[in-house]
Image (tube, helix red, strand yellow):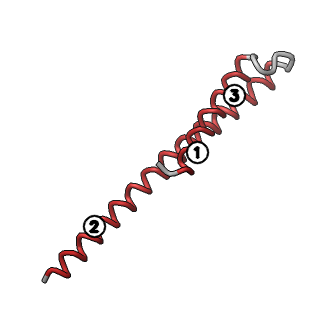
Amino acid sequence: MNAVLIINIVTSIVVFVIGILILAGVITPAVSSSIRYTFGIIFMAYGIYRFFNFLSKRKLIKIQENHEMIEKEKDKLINRK
C-alpha cells in the first residue's frame, strides 16, 4: 500500500477517535457540553471525510493500475503481429 494511503487511513482513525473522546468528555471535561458536542461532531465528521477520501484514492489507484495493465497487454498483442 502507498505511504500516502497509510497516512490517510491512520489520520482518519485518530481524528475520529479524538472526536469520540471529546464528545464523551474524556479529553475536555471542564468545557461546556454544547462546545464539546460541536467539536466532537466536527472531529468525527472530519475523520469520516478522511476515510472516504482514502477509499476514493485507493479506488483511483486500482483503476490506474488496471488501465496500465490493459495498455501493456494491448501493446504486447500489437507487437506480436
Under mark 3, the amino acid is Ile
Under mark 2, the amino acid is Ile
Q: Position of residue 67 (x, y in %)?
A: 34, 65
Figure check: 11 above or below 67: above
Ranked by sequence position, the earlier of labels 1 and 2 is 1
Quadrant location of residue 21?
top right
Figure check: 31 above or below 9: above
Q: Marks 3 and 1, Cα distance to the nearest angstrom?
A: 15 Å
Q: Which of the numbered marks, if any, corresponds to residue 42?
A: none
- Residue occupying image coordinates x 52% and y 43%: 52
Judged from the image, the secondary structure of the residue bearing numbered disc 3 is helix
Crowdedness near tag 3: few (<14), some (14–19) or many (≥20) residues, C-alpha within 10 Å: some
- Residue occupying image coordinates x 52% and y 46%: 54
Mark 2 vs 3: CB contact within 8 A:
no
- Quadrant containing the C terminus is bottom left
> Which residue does the numbered mark 3 point to in the structure image?
18
**Farthest residue in the right direction?**
30
Q: Position of residue 55 (x, y in %)?
A: 48, 45
Q: Marks 1 and 2, Cα distance to the nearest angstrom?
A: 28 Å
Crowdedness near tag 2: few (<14), some (14–19) or many (≥20) residues, C-alpha within 10 Å: few
Ranked by sequence position, the earlier of labels 2 and 3 is 3
> Which residue does the numbered mark 2 point to in the structure image?
70
